[in-house]
Amino acid sequence: MGSTLRVLLTVWLLVAGVASARVDGGVDFETFVADSPDAGVVASAQVDAGIDAASAELETVVTGLRESVPDDRASSVVRRTELDRRLPRSTPDAVRFEPGVFVQRTAHGQASVFIRGLTGQQTVLLFDGVRLNTSTWRQGPNQYFFTLDSATIDTLEVLRGGASTWFGADALGGVVAVKPLDAPDGREGPVLKSSVTLKGRSADDELGGRAQLEAAVGNVGFIGGVGGRNVGLLESAGSVRNLVGGGTPDVPRFAPDGRTQLGTGFKELSFDGRATVRFGEAHALTVALYGYRQFDAPRTDQCPPPGARFDECLTISEQFRTLGYAKAGLVFRDVSIDVVGSWQRQLERREGVRPASFVVSTGRDVVDSFGGAVRLTTRDFAPTEGLTLRARGGIDSWVDLVESRAWLSFTDLGVTVERSRGQYLTGSRALTGGAFSELEVGLPFGVSLRGGGRVGWSTVDAPGDDASGTVAVSQRWLPLAGTGGVAWKPFESTTFALNVDHSFRPPNLDDLTSRQQTGPGFQFENPALKPETATTLEVGAKVRTPVVTVDAWVFQTWLGAAIGRQPRTIAECPPNTPQCESSWNRLQLVNAKGLSNVRGLELSGRLRFPHGFGARATVNATFGEGPNLIERPADPLGPWQERVPLSRIPPVNGIAELSWAYATQFSSAISLQWAGPQDRLAVADLSDARIGLGGTPGFAVVDLRLSAKVTSFLSASVVFENVLDSPWRAHGSSINGPGRGVMLALTGQWAALR
């Protein structure tokens, strides 16, 4: 443990001591009320009922389409108070405790969120109503969600299940929608606040922090800040053994101590500014800019690659994202309107170093995305007694413009050679969008019906390149989506629901044009791919009382024309692509010829006891299979299966947590995160160095958390992670989870006005 972290831990112990003294002499509140804008509207009622506002899960949607998370959909929300207590390493890490969610880590600076067994191009990420997905997202877009600074986030909503009617292409498995911290309201008096947070972690010697300013005068408010951190090599609890043979996976490689993982560590810088002008009680105009800069983040499974020298490494030297947008929220007598227009730039620079060959391979991709959306929601109408109607609708469209380059540098000669194409092709462009509507009908006896549809549009255009044998692409699709459901609420606290959803995903530029090194091997393009579809049937029940919260869902998703990886021979490699010929495995994306399916069970529950005690648990089970993408040989040498497991389906997993909170001054928790073994492997998984021989073993990791608010201007949180020092690894990851360590955050807040 570094000397700086020892100092922080000493400060924490002093803080905790003062907090304990204040608790002993404080007022005996039985509940902890979250200081959250979303919880504010129900805070007083929850205090009366003895409910923790942060854990009551009286949830608020962040998508702008509904004023509250519907009881008839599988969903959950992570709030700012939970982020402050859990101290997640990243934004993807912030949702790992949610039902139906599993987080895979290709590197220490990358992570991919799985929702109901699907990830990447099959899920949608939103930031304040702005679509983050671009046309170059891969099947495992580990970098991109990581580029949201969790310190700027107010809530994260996870909507599980198909959602293309509301959110367009890619929403086959679900949606993660982020709501950022809002600017203060100065109409009741001027506001001037500042805060500084310092963070440290022992497992990777991370040191960082954030400075934030809030100000408001009249109807104009502003919030902004800068943050950064320096993250070192990640120390695990040791090697994770293969399920077969007892050996270890090819990645990661370890330092001589057998715990420190090579190919980890990174640096990052973030900045943001958000100004809001409020008119009347409901109108608001917001202008915002968010930026993220990550430097020198090795891709662990390629640093070094399996079988290569220790000095070979593929590093993402620059992972930059800049997002600017303007957003207006207007409420009239019978309808509310949300309008957003945005520009986003995603820049990635990769450097592959092979010192023994005196070669450095560099690639640089830039994607500029422009777009916007208009969404409308009517108030409830009651044309007759016992009948209510509400309508929603809107239109959205997003366009991507791509620049991509690649070059080789021969360090012994001092010569650089430009390649004819990059990972993508400069001049490529893609458009996605659609128009949608939905109607909700409330009937007597607690019954409600809903139904809606979307007419989408999607175009992809990319130039050809004769030198690399790349053909030009020009594709057009007009996909349709639809959703419907019935819900019955026999009591105010209980809801039963049945939903059917049909969603779509047209192939994007990554599918149709990219050439890249992936975990299973070198992957090259297929310009003849067809769109994927997903039809989901789910049945669920929700119970909400002051003492018990229960969510239970079962689902089945049928994937049509699912896109997967099919092995290829050296002879099938594209021309002038030496990376393909030299790779251990060569793969091309193809559409499955039959239906694939994913089915599963999601259970979550929470108990609230007197005097601030509580318990929470989740269980997730997902099973996926589809047609074998390897065609049956004429003379098989061994057994051949017509249907095989889908790639990287998470194992059975869940969490269990016991907590105690005392007013707004102190909270504590002990949590268990666990997963069973996963030995159902797809063909691509068998060649993936990130997955050990026979699959990934199960794990159980115990964390302890403490948070204290000593005064109105000083608070602290500490997490003792993996207290049993258990070796563990999330299925499909390149890195093992951290070993025993300490995470600490100290926050000082000052208010010059109000």
Image: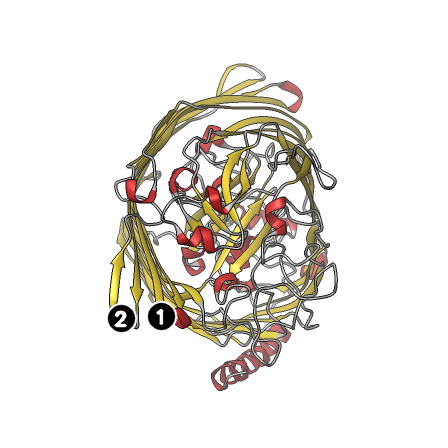
Q: Which residue is mark 2?
A: 413
Q: Position of residue 466 (x, y in %)?
A: 29, 40
**Is tag 1's residue or tag 2's residue first in the polypeptide sequence?**
1
Q: What residue do we see at 41% from left, 64% from top? A: 315
| Relative height, residue 138 to residue 461 (above, below) | below
Label 1 residue SS: loop
Residue type (three-letter) at the residue carrying disc 1: Phe
Q: What residue do we see at 50% from left, 81% from top? A: 5
Please indicate whether residue 600 sits to the left or right of residue 340 in the image: right
Q: CA distance from mark 1 to mark 2?
A: 9 Å
Q: Position of residue 147 (x, y in %)?
A: 41, 56
Q: Position of residue 590 (x, y in %)?
A: 51, 35
Give the quarter of the image for residue 484: top right
Q: Residues within 10 Å of mark 1 (few under 14, many from 20)?
A: few
Label 2 residue SS: loop
| Relative height, residue 363 to residue 164 (above, below) | below
Residue type (three-letter) at the residue carrying disc 2: Leu
